[in-house]
Amino acid sequence: MKTYSWLNQNRLPRLAATLVVLVALAISAQSGQDQHGYTISQFDVPGFQDTFPEDNNAVGVIVGKARDANGEGPAFVRARNGAITAFEAPYATLTTAFSINPAGAITGSYLDANDTLHGFLRAPNGAITTFDAPGAGTGMDNGTSAQNINAAGTIAGRYFDDNSVQHCFVRASNGAITTFDAPGAGTGPFQGTFPAIQDGINSAGAVTGSSWDPSDVFHGFVRVANGVITMFDVPGAGTGAFQGTFPGGINEAGVIDGSYADASDVNHGFVRASNGAITTFDVPGAGTGAFQGTIPANINNLGAIDGSYIDASDVAHGFVRAPDGSITTFDAPGAGTGAFQGTFPDGINDAGAITGYYIDNNNVLHGFLRTRNSW
């Protein structure tokens, strides 16, 4: 089994020459109501061991990827009624859907037979358009990865050049692609500039993400639609290798969420207001050891943030931080309680519905959806 950098994807034997569709009604194997009046339901893509939801839109449609025991499998889209469609980009050996907009347009990436990445746009009717950013490399693990799509159909992502350096791109709805690098970005392998995933671009075209500098330290950036880039570091962020600031998403008001790793490699959450003011926070119960702590995932337009926290036993739990700063924690039914198991939220929509995955006690991954009981 071969692991690909950044995408945690493995090579997939061809399922079909163009588009493979597997439609099934996902049966919730486990569900339960938590103490906060929410229902958490499990779902799995039929025929695959692991299900990784990545994002959900305003009407409750979820996208992600499915993988078998060898790490192989297609992308999927799950309708609000639970029907799942699994699909591949044309000529793909492996497909991942990262982001979905309110209209149901999906963007993501796929690997070709040469293990090169390419971006794709899947229209609401299922038609797929593929594309590459100018300057994208053509070798193994290089190429184009589309990771965010906004309501206007603008896509933000990253590409790896032939030296495996990362660069950002924005693809307009007419297909025009603009590339950019954050000031101070490194030029070594895997260094450079990359966006946040799922909610890294808002409807105004503002993009947030990280710059990986020559000393392997990470810094936050926000780029507005006219191309102006503002760099920022969270107070308390570490300045050692693989420490720093990691934005997670940006909402319509320009508020950014994310995490930062301090000088002891402990993770903490932050919120950056549109005026640049930064508030930091920790989830009660988060561990204080290296690589433990609070790791926000995404932010919705009301300012609610979801994510995971890693406790002192290295178990992951879900949380949601309300706009007023109050924090609620939760665990998906069936989530494992061993080290590196637990609950990992990803997308959160404006209704407060959260999707993500959990790792059970057998290290199998399942999708979950946490909704208000009136959803």
Image (cartoon, grey):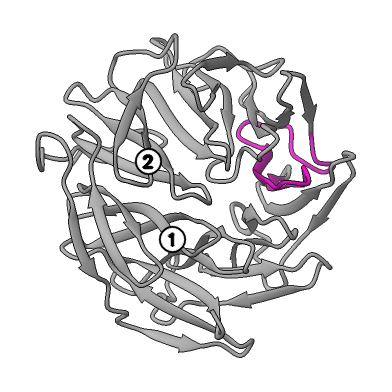
Report the residue marked by disc 1.
61
User: Residue tagged by mark 2?
Assistant: 123
**How many dots with numbers?**
2
Is residue 363 shown to the viewer in this render? no
The percent position of residue 255, horizontal first and vertical second, equals: 77, 46
- Identified at 42% across, 67% down, the residue is 341
Judging depth in this view, the residue of 89 and 290 nearest the camera is 89
- Residue drawn at (24%, 25%) of the image: 115
Q: Based on the displayed image, in which of its 4 quarters is residue 359 positioned?
A: bottom left
Outermost residue, front direction?
Answer: 125
The answer to whether 227 is drawn above or below residue 15 in the figure is above
Callout 2 amino acid? Ala
When asked about the image quadrant of residue 49, the answer is: bottom left
Residue 142 x %, y %: 36, 20
Where is residue 313? Give x, y as percent: 54, 69
> Disc 1 vs disc 2: which is toward the camera?
2
Q: Inspect the magenta stretch and tell me whether residue 305 lies in it.
A: no
- Residue 285 lies left or right of residue 135; in this view the side is right
Q: CA distance from mark 1 to mark 2?
A: 14 Å
| Residue 70 in view, yes or no | yes
Kindly state the secondary structure of the residue where label 2 is placed.
loop
Question: Camera-side residue: 62 or 29?
Answer: 62
64 or 282, nearer to the observer = 64
Q: In screen coordinates, is 276 left or right of 248?
A: right
Q: Of label 1 and label 2, which has the lower sequence position? A: 1
Q: Which residue is at 65% across, 65% downward? A: 287
The quarter in which the N terminus is drawn is top left
Q: Amino acid at mark 1?
A: Val
Q: What label sits on residue 203 in the rendered view?
A: none
Q: Secondary structure at mark 1?
A: loop
Magenta stretch, residue numbers: 233-261
